[in-house]
Image (tube, grey):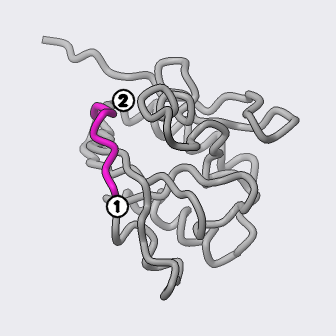
Amino acid sequence: MTKNLNKIKAEYRRTEYLPSEHLVITVDGEPLDQILRKFYTDHHFSGLIPTLLDCLDDDEERKLVWDKIESNAKIIPILMCPDDCDLWYTVIIVECEFNDDIVKWERIGLDMTSKKDYSSEKVGSNIKWLDKILPMEFSREEYQNCINTFKKEL
């Protein structure tokens, strides 16, 4: 039996708060921020941008994100607020599972790490899971192509 996998891509699009096109993560042709907005209309998820863009203000945070992506970490910050371009304000986390052929986003959540004792290493230590979002599974090759597209922009 062949599994129906989701399609993941990095595509140039405009988002709500940035006037020019930039890379966004799309799943099955829909930007990830819009998928979140569709299920959580009471949150301000529309317009969030990938943490993989070269606009994270803090070098330490940029290194942390890319270290997590490249090491196939279980918890990865994937979207952030475009106003702040840091891991301090609104951050969306994906909980990942990796195997030879498939990358699965088990859950997607909102980082609730205390800002009182903030350090970038603590991002993702307290997550409010967005239970309306179903798991997503991608071919390992497509997932890596998406990541590599962002990497070329650095």
| 1 vs 2, front mark | 1
Between 18 and 150, the one lying in front of the other is 18
Circle 2 residues within 10 Å: few <14, some 14–19, many ≥20 = some
Secondary element at tag 2:
strand
In the image, 94: left or right of 131? Answer: right
Specify the amino acid type for callout 2: Ser
Image coordinates for residue 52, horizontal then vertical, percent: 62, 52
What is the span of residues highlighted in magenta in the rendered image? 127-135
Q: Is residue 65 above or below residue 93?
A: below
For label 2, the residue is 139
Which quarter shows the C terminus? bottom right
Which quarter shows the N terminus? top left
Assess whether residue 128 is covered by the magenta stretch: yes
How many numbered badges does the structure rendering display? 2
For label 1, the residue is 127
Residue drawn at 78 percent across, 40 percent down: 17
Image coordinates for residue 151, horizontal then vertical, percent: 66, 50
Residue extending farthest to the bottom is: 117
